[in-house]
Image: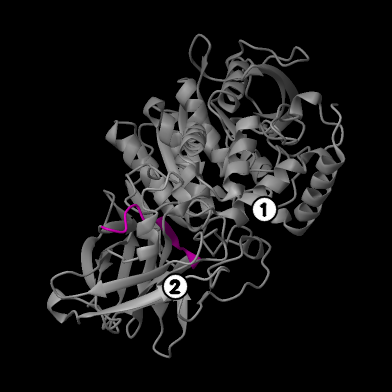
Amino acid sequence: MPSVSRAASRSVLRASLALLASTALAAPLALTAPVHASATDPYAVSALKVTVRAGGRICTLDADVYRPSGVDAAHPAPAVLTTNGFGGSKADGSTDAIAKALAARGYVALAYSGLGFGKSGCPISLDDPRIDARAASGLVDVLAGTRAADDGTRVDYVTQDGTGDPRVGMIGGSYGGAIQMATASVDHRIDALIPLITWNDLSYSLDPNNADRIRGAAGPVPGAYKYEWTNGFFLIGEAQGLLHPSLAASRWGGAGCLHFVAPACQTKRLLDSGRYPAERTAAMLAYVRSVSPVSYLRSVKAPTLLVQGQADTLFNLNEAAATYRTLTAQGTPARMIWQYWGHSGGMEHPAPGELDLGKGHLESSYVGRRILAWFDRYLHHRTGAHTGPAFAYYRDWVTDGPTYATSPRFPVGAGQRLYLSGDGRLVGDPAQVARGSRTYRNRLLATSHSENPAAGLLRLPDLAPYDGRGTYLDWTSAPVAEPVDVVGTPRVTLKVISPRTERVQNSSDAADKLVLFAKLYDVAPGGSKTLVHRLVAPARVPDVTRKFTVELPAIVHRYEPGHRLRLVIAASDAAYTGNRGVKPVTVTSAPEDTGVLELPVTQGALG
């Protein structure tokens, strides 16, 4: 083991303490204790070590293979690979439960600890297709029978589509979701994917810029650094040495990090600096996108069932929508489900009828049945297995009847427009817009609050969302007369006036540009308000001399009769870094020239 400086040791100690305080951050899909196989289980479990070359390193993968009873070389079965969420391992409750559930249904399941986690070697490399995917491809070789485990064990009981080509799917969530698409991009032997609550573009996930966003990409410059989420995961990664003190030397990272590859470490350092100089920022964006599906989906041909969570401020619904659009546009079979739970709530105790991966009861939920049908169709090749509609979404307001609505296409809903009036109203006709202008200014400390990710994951009380007086602008609709269902991505187009920002408009440091935060509230008749899923849309304004469009996170939400919709543009948010310096912002409105909020409505009318 290389020597570690005192400063680094202190860093690890701090990381471990943070880990104890935020254990639930470690593995978003690993929230229950592992269940041990018994003599009555309809499968046998064998531990395997498989050493592979990945990204110029020699890495040993720690895996378990679950072999169903009656499956052998003469009676083979399709296989499914699954791996852990960030910070977890093959033994996590959900990873273990998925493997057991599929093995009990006749699939050969291979669960493994991702690189840098559990007892697998090499540093954390963020599901890099050049590293993590190459390692996973080595496990596909094991399932093909062309590679033996380190102890000589060979798996010769997986259905083959050709010499060296096992019939194999993948399933997993979050960190265990992106690895599927990365693997399928470099190994076309993968036959089916089911990524849950994962990312499309990490630059959008960790440093989102929702202004003038190009579909499927986060835009040319970073937005607002999502430092609370990022710091939690970074500390968990750095604490791996304390969790596993006998780590092999292959686990040590570079560029000042203990357990991350050097480019990931350099990315974190740039984000922490609060500065975005052009050359370094371009290099950072290139790297982060290279480990994101947005850069390699063109090579993914395996049929993909995307499952994303509505309650998810880490990887919001826009991520799955971007992946879905790319896959379907290139002809890759794909379906998409927007379930309720995500990283921000509901994982440990899903709503009745929602998928509970920790228990492995797939038949008891809509999403679980879709998962089984997907593998039935693409792994068992049962042509009668229905893969379901193109799009399905959970409706938390339904108490009697099916909670999921379905559609043969995506997106759904007609765009209804509301106009930003100078008197703070949202109106349905530009002629109703009152002339006027209003101003807010940011302060040096955050004055708005949306969430504390650790509180949500640990099920601890969190502050209610709020906005400090004088540091935001809001526009509120009239009470709706009938239920209004919004399903999809709202967008607001506006122009702001910010003289101090205009003076640095052409700065070589993108951090000088104005940042604002857009969000939607539901205001009840009594005046209480709810920030829908605590979602916000940071936007780094590209040019304060022209109009721009902010794409908010997609939502599935019903505005009940008597409720009002409120759009807020705030100066800051405590979960993100904000503006450099104090920047006053003015928004003007006139009937012939005003901001526009567009909402995808499937039922009811606004305005």
Q: Which of the 4 image quarters holds residue 431?
A: bottom left
Q: Residue at x 48, y 36 (%)?
A: 292
Residue with the most extreme front position: 503
Q: Is residue 153 above or below residue 169?
A: above
Q: Is residue 108 above or below residue 243?
A: above
x and y, in percent, of residue 427 in the image: 22, 78
Q: Indicate yes or no whether the magenta region holds residue 539.
A: yes
Q: Is residue 143 above or below residue 198?
A: above
Q: First in sequence: mark 1 or mark 2?
A: 1
x and y, in percent, of residue 462 in the image: 63, 72
| Foreground residue among 465 and 190 | 465
Contact, mark 1 vs mark 2 (Cβ under 8 Å): no
Region rendered in magenta: 534-545
Q: Which residue is mark 1?
A: 25
Q: Element at badge 2?
A: strand
The span from disc 1 to disc 2 (Cα, nearest Å) is 34 Å
